[in-house]
Amino acid sequence: MKGTTCIAVLFLLSMPLLMRAQGSRALLERTITVSFNQEPLDMALRKIAREGGFTFSYNSALINSNRLITMSFTTTTVREVLDKIFQGTIQYKARNKYIILTKAATSSSNKDARFYTGYVMDEATGQRLKNVSVYDPVSLNSTITDSYGYFEIKIDKPSPNLILAVNKANYTDTLVAVTDKNGLLKIPLHIDKQKMRTLADSVKGKLKRFWETKIMQSINTANVSDTLYRKQQFSLVPFVGTNHKLSASVVNDYSYNIFGGIAKGVNKFELGGIFNIDRGDVKGWQLAGALNAVGGRVKGVQMAGLINAVKDSVAGVQFAGLINADNNSSGKFSAAGLFNYTHRQSYGWHLAGLGNMTIGEQKGPHLAGLFNFSTHDAGPAQVAGLLNFSGGKMNGAQLAGLLNFAARDSKGAQVAGLLNVAGSTVEGAQVSGLLNYATRVKGAQIGLVNISDTIHGVPIGLFSFVLKGYHKIEFSADEIFYTNVAFRTGVRQFYNIFTAGAKPNTFKSEETTWTFGYGVGTAPRLNRWLSLNVDLTSNQVLKGNTIEGVNMINKVFVGVEMEPVRRIALVVGVTLNGYVTDTKYSNYPELFTDYTPNIFYDHTYNNGMNMKMWLGGKIGLRFL
């Protein structure tokens, strides 16, 4: 326990350094909006630095200060702005709060070596992709994109027709022809839907072969192009019935098949003991013990003990014991014991014991025991026991026992037992048992962990990280603990607080009194440099490496944060303290060794818990 405590304290004390290092790497990825109109280069650099919140460091002889710049950039990374201005003649690195400019290096050992840089992004969402492999198939030189989608690759002897290979799991392998021109490459990747297309083509091909080899082989069917009509027909099996060998060329109002039958179409009603096969359209009711197979459209009600297969579209309802498979679009209602499959648009309600799959756009509610899958936009709802997936926008609610995924915008609610992911904007709420992720959120995130780039709303959870949100490292002292560190993360309306503190009693580390805990708070702005702070924290107190029973200080803090200098703030305020201990344990550290506050409440309850209350204060510095 002693080792664990020391490691935890070292980690907390090193957090400012870690955050600082991470921040320095991110300087080149900060987005700025800036424009220049015939401005000298050195003045343009000052303007960029001011907008990005950093400082340039360079030798004045390196740049031509008399060069005039006329350019405009909107929400563009600092790296891209510098690349556009210098066209590869200058290289830049981030160190702490500085971006250092130096002359573009050339390899002394290999004068033919070239460096190529760029970004890799999702073609559909524009999101930059990390952990993408970029390599030269000839020399096998390779690199991996960083967390911002950026890569640098050195090619020792690039050919005039250099081709870079770009690969990432679940995305299509891409080859990029690179010209000799300097500058950042921008490489789009798109999600690999080939497996879904292969499945769709397989189903489509089997249906087509079924029609051509089993049905169209009848000589009469091939010879007789006219459509014949009959009021009704009876058959034992195909071509054995009242329509004889011309069965496949006849449209019947009523069709009755003892085992199975074939017709060109049905206008009102068809019944098959085992199967019904129709080359053309079916209207009205179609009932089969096992299989309904229709080569045209269905308008009405289709029911089968096992499978309904329709080559064109359905305008009506389908019930199948196992599978409904529609090669074009599905109708108002489809229910299957196992699986609903639609090759293009799915309309209306789809209910399946296993899953609903749409290789196209979903335009109706889908409910399944296991999964719902759509390769394009989906809505208004996907409800599944395990997984919901939308390859485009999600225009409605996603509810899943495990995972919800929307490749683009999600307008509505995502509710999952484990994980919600939206590749772009969420307008509504994300609620999960573990993790919520979205690029932009207009609404709320509720989960154990919430991650986003920006949020217009509130993330509620044990840990929330908003890239463009509220982050503070705090060092403070109060009347009991003189050395405290805290990390605040979230948004101003609601943030999480992770705290730790120490009060050395002697030079022996095992007698040091420690505290660690968690809390929440809010920090509404009063004006540009002044904010109100209201925090609620709870901290366990221990001596050395021993934790015995409940020994907690609970604090309500009300104070102000003054930030006259950007990213450095002074915080001061008062606290209401409640010290709760379990009287069954006696080896608690003595808190009031240096100062004893005015304890206005001291009471031991029937369960042995003692509560002491007093008023105190806190003063500290905050960074970031």
Image: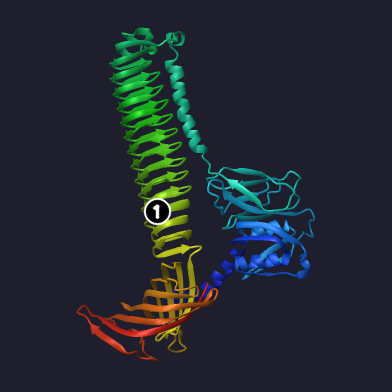
The residue shown at (31%, 80%) is 578
Q: How many marks?
A: 1
- Up-down relation of residue 277 to residue 479 (above or below): above
Q: Position of residue 147 (x, y in %)?
A: 56, 58
- Up-down relation of residue 324 to residue 547 (above or below): above
The residue shown at (67%, 65%) is 93
The residue shown at (53%, 41%) is 192
Looking at numbered disc 1 in the image, what kind of residue is underneath it? Gly
Q: Position of residue 531 (x, y in %)?
A: 45, 74
Pick whichever, 413 or 174, lies toward us: 413
Identify the residue position indicated by label 1 in the image. Answer: 428
Q: Secondary structure at mark 1?
A: strand
- Up-down relation of residue 153 to residue 253 (above or below): below
Q: Position of residue 477 (x, y in %)?
A: 44, 83
Q: Is residue 544 visible?
A: no
Image-based side of 164 in relation to 596, left or right = right
* Quadrant location of the N terminus in the rendered image: bottom left
Q: Is residue 617 visible?
A: yes
Sort mark 1 into few (<14), some (14-19) or many (20+) by Cα contacts within 10 Å: some
Q: Position of residue 157 (x, y in %)?
A: 76, 50
Query: Farthest residue toward the left?
Result: 606
Quarter of image, res 585: bottom left
Pick whichever, 244 or 24, lies toward us: 24
The residue shown at (35%, 7%) is 244
